[in-house]
Every structure is written in C-alpha cells, then in structure tokens.
C-alpha cells in the first residue's frame, strides 16, 4: 500500500487555521491581564453608583415612612430615637439596621416594615433606608442620648 499524496490545499488550510488559533490565543493571553487590571475599578464604580442610588431611594423612603417618628433626617423624632447620631451609626451594623426595620422592635411602637412581616416595604427598599442612614454617618452629630425620645416643647 502506497502513501497518499500530500494535499497542498488541505495543508495550507490547516496552517491558516493553526495561525488563526495562535493569533486568537495571543489576543486572549493579552486580554486577560488587561481585564484583571480594569475590572476591579469597574466593579468599584458600579458598587459606588449602586450605593448612591440606594441612598437616594432610601432618603425618599425615610422621609415618607420613618421621619414622622424619627424626625427629619433621623434627628430627634417625636416617637422614635434619633437614628442620625454618631453613637447609633457606629454601634449598628447594616444588617442590624435592616433587621430592625424589617421585623420591628418588640415592646415599642416600631412595627415591622418588611412585606414578609406584614409591612409595606421590600427588602431592597429597606436596604435603601439602611444605606441612606449609613450615608449620614460621616456628618452624624455626637448624641450620646440618641435613644431618648425628644417630645416637642421639651
């Protein structure tokens, strides 16, 4: 049995495909490090944008749902404690704030606000309120008596 003759057209086609594959591999090898350099910045920017949007949504929700008890911007409400205080914001984690808003505070007038517990707000809306409160932390006033309810005229 004799060997097949070399098919030049097939050889050239195979070489072209191998060259194209090599070029693609070089592009990918160069693209992945570039991606690794740029992606953390993109993610951080996206996270910051989401945080800003949540804080804006949370501010609107706080004004409509929370300010009547906790005061405008969380300062000295007629029924609830001041949430815009350095002491409260340093002591409470985001998950604690979300939990307090979601399920309420037993033995107080603070009811549950989560839809899951009969309230009017979704978890995203409650997260927005927590994000808004957290955005106040940088400029929060020093208020060691943040738990004390300030009644009008006192």
Image (spheres, rainbow, N blue to C red):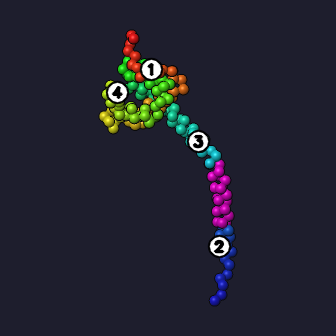
- Residue 41: x %, y % from top left: 60, 41
Viewer can see residue 124: yes
Pair 1/2: label in front: 1
Residue at screen point 32% across, 36% down: 117
Residue at screen point 68% across, 78% down: 6
Q: What separation in Å lies between label 4 and label 3 (alpha carbons)?
A: 39 Å
Quickly name the residue at label 1: 145
Q: Quadrant of the N terminus?
A: bottom right
Q: Residue furthest top?
A: 153
Magenta residue check for 32: yes
- Residue 52: x %, y % from top left: 51, 32
Quickly name the residue at label 4: 110
Pair 4/1: label in front: 1
Quickly name the residue at label 2: 10
- Residue 107: x %, y % from top left: 31, 28
Give, as a single range, the part of the protein colored magenta: 16-35
Q: Earlier in the sequence, mark 4 or mark 1?
A: 4
Q: Earlier in the sequence, mark 4 or mark 3?
A: 3
Quickly name the residue at label 3: 42
Determine the secondary structure under disc 2: helix
Crowding at dot 1, Cα within 10 Å, few <14 / some 14-19 / many 20+, comes out as few
Q: Residue furthest bottom?
A: 1
| In contact (CB < 8 Å): disc 3 and disc 1 | no
- Residue 40: x %, y % from top left: 59, 43
| In contact (CB < 8 Å): disc 1 and disc 2 | no
- Helix, strand or loop for the magenta stretch, by majority: helix
Q: Earlier in the sequence, mark 4 or mark 2?
A: 2
Viewer can see residue 73: no
């Amino acid at each position: 049995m004799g060997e097949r003759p070399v098919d030049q057209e097939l050889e050239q086609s195979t070489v072209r495909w191998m060259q194209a594959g090599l070029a693609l591999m070089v592009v990918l090898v160069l693209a992945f490090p570039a991606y690794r350099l740029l992606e953390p910045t993109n993610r951080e920017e996206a996270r910051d944008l989401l945080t800003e949007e949540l804080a804006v949504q949370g501010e609107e929700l706080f004004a409509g749902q929370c300010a009547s008890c906790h005061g405008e911007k969380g300062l000295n409400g007629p029924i609830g404690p001041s949430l815009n205080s350095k002491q409260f914001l340093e002591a409470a984690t985001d998950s604690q704030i979300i939990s307090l808003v979601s399920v309420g505070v037993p033995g107080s007038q603070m009811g549950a606000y989560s839809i899951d517990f009969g309230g009017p707000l979704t978890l995203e809306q409650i997260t927005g309120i927590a994000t808004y409160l957290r955005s106040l932390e940088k400029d929060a006033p020093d208020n060691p008596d943040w738990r004390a309810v300030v009644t009008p005229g006192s």
